[in-house]
Amino acid sequence: MATGRNPSGAISQRKSGPPANPFKSYNFYVEMGGIVVGGFTTVDGLQSKIEVKSVRQGGVNDLEYKLGGQVTYVDLVFKAGITALDPMWLWYQAALSGKIKRQNGSIYLLDDEGNPTVSWNFYNAWPIEWQGPSLDAGQNLVASQSFTLAHEGIRKNSGSGG
């Protein structure tokens, strides 16, 4: 239960739904084609934008209508350490040879107990770019790589992650 003060200064109690604390961005996993595809360190590109079209009415100079246009989606970028098992690399290699296989996927944000809380589903994705590690003998960092995926849309789900 959450408590608060009402305008008269008395403490009031109200029942609340799920906890209002924000989830931590480091606790997530990625699934594609029904298979968890690795431990990514970052996922970027969870973004979409609606084009705004301005329309003016003839003879009315002080009014502008804003209408929604096309929706665009930013490419998704997945970064991870390099390991011996690398399904993303195999998928990218297939695309390089002209065998583009589009897959649906999901990014699951987890709570502190490891349960899915919020997820984003992306559709008809395929790899369009790979970036390999920066190798430096003077550092002791994990060798990492990134994959960029083009896709055809994102939908957010709340609740049990599905």
Image (spheres, rainbow, N blue to C red):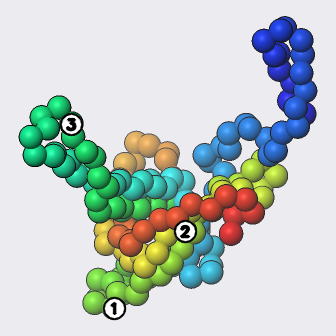
Q: Quadrant of residue 12?
A: top right
Disc 3 element: loop
Disc 2 element: strand
* Residue at x 29% of width, y 62% of height: 70
The residue at which mark 3 appears reads as 63
Q: Amino acid at mark 3?
A: Leu
Query: From this viewpoint, which residue is outermost toward the left?
Result: 59
Q: Quadrant of residue 65?
A: top left
* Residue at x 66% of width, y 43% of height: 24
Count of marks, rendered view: 3
Name the spot of residue 59 as percent of width and height, x first.
9, 40
* Residue at x 14% of width, y 38% of height: 60
Disc 1 element: loop
Between residue 50 and residue 79, name the one nearer to us: 50
| Location of residue 3 with respect to 126 vertically, above or below | above
Q: Nearer the viewer, mark 1 or mark 2?
A: 2
Name the spot of residue 69 as percent of width and height, x first.
28, 59
Relative placement, left or right, of 28 versus 76 is right
* Residue at x 62% of width, y 62% of height: 157
Question: Is mark 2 in CB contact (under 8 Å) with mark 3?
Answer: no
CA neighbours of label 3 inside 10 A, class few (<14), some (14 to 19), many (20+) = few
